[in-house]
Amino acid sequence: MVDTTLGLVWQRLATRRPVVVAHRGDSGAQPENTLTAFAAAIDAGAQVIEFDVHASADGIPVCIHDETLDRTTDAATVLGRAGIEVAHAALADLAKLDAGRWMGVEHAGVGLPTLQAALDLMLPRVIPMIEHKGGAAEVLVELLQRLGVVEAVLVQSFDWNFVRRVHSLEPRMMLGVLGEGRLDAESLARIPLTGASLVHWHVHDLRAEDIDELRRRGLLVCVYTANSDVELAGAAALGADAITTNHPARLGALVERGIARPA
Ligand code: G3P
Ligand code: CA
């Protein structure tokens, strides 16, 4: 059930039009999970920015998708070894990395941001959708409480026990459960136990009747990751409250052209 302050904001935003969620920022055009991608997503008109968070070895939440540093940074060169996990790197070392060069030389010089820097950039202009990939619930909740933003952000995870733990630590926080594959009766029964008010499911796996059922249960429905015009328009027509995309400007343009959620 939607019973958090931010959940009500989402509900209002999604009344007729699907909410535009920029996946890893404007990641179709800029290096994912960087301040550059987040700023570009805001410029593109995204209402929500989805991004991934791991904790460094010294317990600082940082924005990066993978467990290891190699795909999106130059860690192998700068730190002298491939295969280093984010959780085994200190923030001082992460701060030396280039998180843009992998995408093209024109993106060189972009750093790997901390969660705090990302939130400083986003709030209050867009809603941060923080995907937990690694790190303890206590560390994340303590930081968000210290920053005074627990009612301004959404936290989500594929690890539903993590979501449940966050809910027990901070019931004011809007939460999402991520999933893929068939949305079966067991999953439907587990959702209320997590405290989540948003279900974020793989766009290829969610059927029209699943969306109807989730909405009947008072849950917000978001789908990931829709990128083509057909996927984006289809998700809107089936009633998704929000759509996660690598191309927020493309979705925004379709919304302007009139793709809408059913009344
Ligand atoms: O939040 C939806 C989506 O980002 C989940 O998958 O692998 O892109 O983090 P992934
Ligand atoms: Ca993600």
Image (cartoon, rainbow, N blue to C red):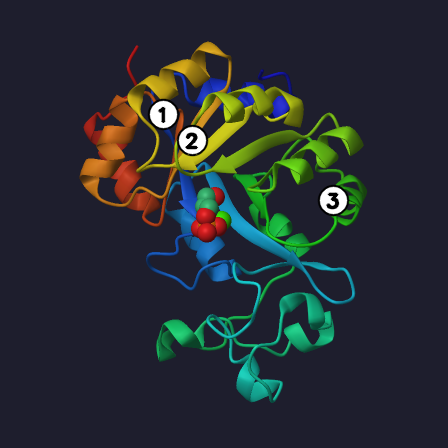
Do the residues under discs 2 and 3 have CB atoms within 8 angstroms? no
| CA gap, disc 3 and disc 1 | 28 Å
Vertical placement of 142 versus 11: above or below? Answer: below
> At 70% across and 38% down in the image, what residue appears?
149
Horizontal side of 231 relative to 128 (left or right) equals: left
Q: Amino acid at mark 3?
A: Ala
Tell me which amino acid carries mark 1.
Ala
| Residue 107 shows up from this direction | no
Q: x, y (%) of residue 118? A: 60, 53
Residue 193, can we see it? Answer: yes
Badge 3 crowding class, 10 Å Cα cut-off, few under 14, some 14 to 19, many 20 or more, is some
Q: Is residue 71 above or below residue 144?
A: below
Residue at image mark 3: 137
Percent coordinates x, y for residue 241 in the rendering: 40, 24
At a point 64% along the width and 33% down the height, the residue shown is 152
Marking on residue 222: 2
Q: Which residue matches tag 1?
A: 240
Q: Is mark 2 within 8 Å of ligand 1?
A: yes
Element type at mark 2: strand
